[in-house]
Amino acid sequence: MARLWWAAALICLGIAAGLRVPLTALMSLHMLVQIPLLVLAGLFAEQAWRAGARPPAVPVEAQAGRRAGWSYNEYGVPGLLLVSLVGAGWMIPKALDDALTDWRVAAFKYLGLPLCGWVLRASLRCSNVVIKLFFLGNFCWMSAIVGMVYLDQPIRLCNAYLQDDQDWAGRGLIALAIVLPSCWLLAELKPVWRFLNR
């Protein structure tokens, strides 16, 4: 199973990096295809690493007597906060412009976004339904607002992209704000149902 996850991660990374020129030619493709592919590459890599890692053999007595300490990613909140901030940063038009002209921003994109995907998967694993819903709602609200700003602006916000493509990026962000919670609800239907029936 780990090999399949590694293959999925490499495919996402290969498409995002190998098709860099066509995927960054349009603002909508840059923001809604390439950036999510880089995040998915890290997410799948973390899943592959977790599937391939063997849990250490700890005696039952040691598990019972061990006191749970504070974790650096307690309940996944620090990791989800980091991913939310990075996601907000890549919705800024200047970040997209700089990723095309500044090698340092481009390097951060190709290295930092897979790392964010890794952190996202690790954080989702240790967070509960309420925390997931909070961060998902925040991200979708932010995505919808930015999409409406893109549509309402009479001038283009990105120097590298045309006004028409900015409108398509805005529509895509609004669609993402609708589709993402629907997909999450289908994936988390049982935990959500148990939480609502308490």
Image (cartoon, rainbow, N blue to C red):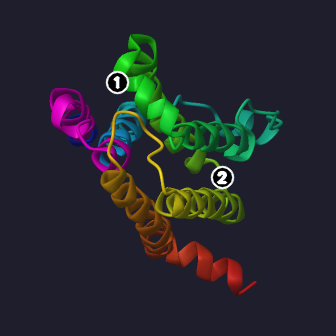
Location of mark 2 (residue)? 127
Q: Which amino acid does label 2 sit on?
A: Ser
Q: Can residue 59 be seen?
A: yes
Q: Alpha carbon of mark 2 to alpha carbon of mark 1: how far?
A: 35 Å
Q: How dense is the environment of label 1, judged by Cα within 10 Å: few (below 14), some, or many (20 and up)? A: some
The number of numbered discs placed on residues in the rendered structure image is: 2
Q: Assign a secondary structure to mark 1.
A: helix
Q: For this rendering, which residue is in front, 129 or 162? A: 162
- Which segment did they paint magenta? 8-32
Which image quarter holds the N terminus?
top left
Q: Is residue 46 above or below residue 134?
A: above
Q: Where is residue 59 in the image (x, y as percent from the top left)?
A: 64, 33
The percent coordinates of residue 116 (x first, y second) are 50, 33
Q: Which residue is drawn at 64% across and 80% down?
A: 194
Q: Can residue 54 be seen in this view?
A: no
Q: Residue 71 carries which label?
A: none
Quadrant of the image occupied by residue 96: top left
Query: Residue 197 in the image: x percent, y percent?
Result: 70, 87
Residue at the image point whose x is 53% and y is 28% from the top:
56
Tell me if 87 is positioned left or right of 75 in this view: left
Name the residue located 76 percent from the left edge and 42 percent from the top edge.
64
Which one is in front, 93 or 128? 93
Look at mark 1 in the image and give the residue it sits on: 100
Q: In which quarter of the image is residue 170?
A: bottom left
**Quarter placement of the C terminus:** bottom right
- Seen from the viewer's position, the closer of residues 52 and 83 is 83
Type of residue at label 1? Leu
Q: Does the magenta stretch include residue 71?
A: no
Residue 133 located left or right of residue 147? right
Q: Is residue 34 above or below residue 56?
A: below
Residue 148 vertical placement versus 80 (above, below): below
